[in-house]
Amino acid sequence: KLMNKLKILFRGWIEIPHSYACVNCFQLVHFYKKYHNKVDIYVEEMPYFRKEWNQSKKLVYTEEYNNILRNLKRWNGEEVDIVYSITYPYDVNPVVINNKNIPKCVFYTSEFAKLTETFFQIGGSQPKSENDVINHISKQNNMYFTAPSFWSFLGIKLMGVNDKKNRIITHGVDSRIFKKHEDTTMRNKIREFYNVKDTDFLLISIGAMTENKGILLILQLLNHLINKLDKKFYKLLLKGTGDLYQSKMFLEIYVSRLIQQNIMTKEESQVLENHIIFTDKTLSYDRINDLYNAADLYISPYLAEGFNLTPLEALSASLPVLVPETGSTREYMFDLYTHGGMNYINYVKSKVIDVNGLKQNTIDIYDLINTMTEKEQHLINMKVERHNQHQILDAFIKENYSWEKVADLLYDYFNYIKEDSLVIN
């Protein structure tokens, strides 16, 4: 007897270079590659958080992955077993197709280990209060949730959602894309292009450059290293997301603020300019991997993150990282640290503070400076040694933090949702 194929509608973003779209696309590609014989996959591109993002459509994956994404079946009203929603704000409206209430799984992250009404959409608008969200969700028998970290998971848990309907499915990394180059040709080319000498030490940070990413701390650190300690061999590569956010403008605002607060002088900021490389272009993931290979440390002293995927990608490319002891990366970093990542993962002292119920890291700038200076020789040695030490960590990442593994976890959860919703209904 032929088993009925599971029918899943992925409602989310595919065609823009936003982090939610990237997660959606990697999940889709690997879910398709592994389960297309067992699952009928439909996709529906949902309206973007900002209308102007419609001008920024592009696929940023490998040609093989881009083709898979282009050829997925666009949903045209077909009956489905489950709707998987990965958009922002989080759409907690029930789904009715052909008069049937369809189970829905809502992907969410919670940077502050808590969610407020501003994160949600009910009907076509933002709810008026947190209680409105809690009351609405409590009435939805067919609503399930998934978050990529325990830190995020707390956001919906605090709204009274039962753990059976709120599953942690970690993010992954594609080690066919994020990997160390066997030779240094591309590393040398990129460093030459950006005028980074072989003896220079290149820090890198990638992302929207919003304040929660810790960019202010990175700029203060760089200023201290270059202008106070006269370590002119440090350079910083910032990769913004110019198609979606005004990253360059953020950078200028941060520098102005540091000058106003007398943390940095105007003259120091001018010296700093020669040590900061800024690129705002949307790059393919192959090109981003080239940047990881060209750099010497991925620096991410974040204040609030729902998962923080870029350090995982950096580690997959054998690039050492610097992250806080606390927050959302703590879970997967501890796992990697104890499975071959000891020389790659560098912690800066941090603690979690609570501001009106919102949790975030706090990091003292002097702890960051001291960590960097204490680790300096080790990190300089890693420029050479990192390429010889990567096998154990690499194998562990492939086994436990790949998008293939995520596809398995999703498949398992979707089957659970289908069974559970049959019992409920």
Image (cartoon, helix red, strand yellow):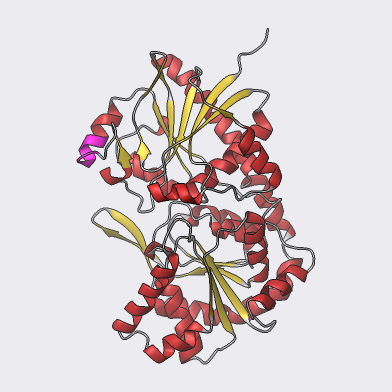
Q: Quadrant of the C terminus?
A: top left
Residue found at x 39% / y 59%: 304
- 124 part of magenta stretch: no
Magenta-drawn segment? 127-133
- Across and down, in percent, residue 37 comes to 68, 24
- Across and down, in percent, residue 394 comes to 70, 55
Q: Is residue 40 among what the camera can see? A: yes
Toward the viewer: 55 or 322? 55
Residue 160 vertical position relative to residue 50 in the rendered view, above or below: above
Indicate the quadrant where residue 145 lies: top left
Indicate the quadrant where residue 187 lies: bottom right
Left or right of 186 in this view: 380 = left
- Across and down, in percent, residue 85 comes to 45, 34
- 131 part of magenta stretch: yes
Left or right of 311 in this view: 213 = left
Residue 153 vertical position relative to residue 409 in the rendered view, above or below: below
Toward the viewer: 32 or 378? 32
Residue found at x 23% / y 41%: 130
Q: Which residue extends farthest right?
A: 183
- Across and down, in percent, residue 311 comes to 56, 60
How many numbered circles does the render carry? Answer: 0
Indicate the quadrant where residue 387 lies: bottom right
Q: Is residue 170 among what the camera can see? A: no
Toward the viewer: 75 or 404? 75
Residue found at x 77% / y 70%: 185
Residue 53 vertical position relative to residue 416 in the rendered view, above or below: below
Q: Which residue extends farthest front?
A: 55
Q: In which quarter of the image is the N terminus?
A: top right
